Image: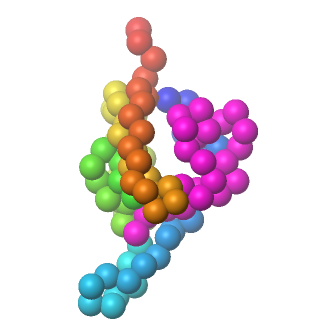
Amino acid sequence: LVNLSELLASAQATPRFGDNASGQRVVEGFELRQVKAGSVVEQVGLKDGDVIVEVNGEKLDGLPAVMRLLGQAQAMAQARVTVLRGGQRMTFVFNTKWPD
């Protein structure tokens, strides 16, 4: 995986809100916008409008989850990212480290 600053500069991600069963407004994931051509985000197959809902099985339901995952990123050998694209769930799996 590239360094964190390069990854963060690859696209914008904004919270996607929805209502849960009790009518409470909740974060359902993070929608990607302005994915830069040739960036690491584009290279792994993500596109403008994709909503990232899970990383390695952990729901992205708010900023605390995002911060926790960023803290774990250096130790991850592989990332499994689940997105919503056009109403369909898709999962992308990619290595986050180069082989030695």
Say above or below: 25 vs 63: below
**What residue is shown at x 59% (from left), y 32% (from top)?**
43
Residue 16 lies, in percent from the top left, at 49, 70
In the figure, is residue 91 to the left or right of 38? left
**Render colour scheme:** rainbow
Residue 66 lies, in percent from the top left, at 41, 56
Q: Which residues are magenta?
A: 28-52
Identify which residue, 86 or 44, lies in the foreground. 86
Residue 32 lies, in percent from the top left, at 58, 56
Q: Does residue 67 appear in this view?
A: no
Q: Does residue 25 appear in this view?
A: yes
Quadrant of residue 53 within the rendered picture:
bottom left
Q: Residue farthest to the bottom?
A: 23
Q: Residue farthest to the right?
A: 37
**What residue is shown at x 55% (from left), y 38% (from top)?**
45
Identify which residue, 91 or 96, lies in the foreground. 91
Residue 51 is a magenta residue: yes
Residue 12 is a magenta residue: no
Q: Quadrant of the C terminus?
A: top left
**What residue is shown at x 36% (from left), y 66% (from top)?**
61
Identify which residue, 13 or 5, lies in the foreground. 13
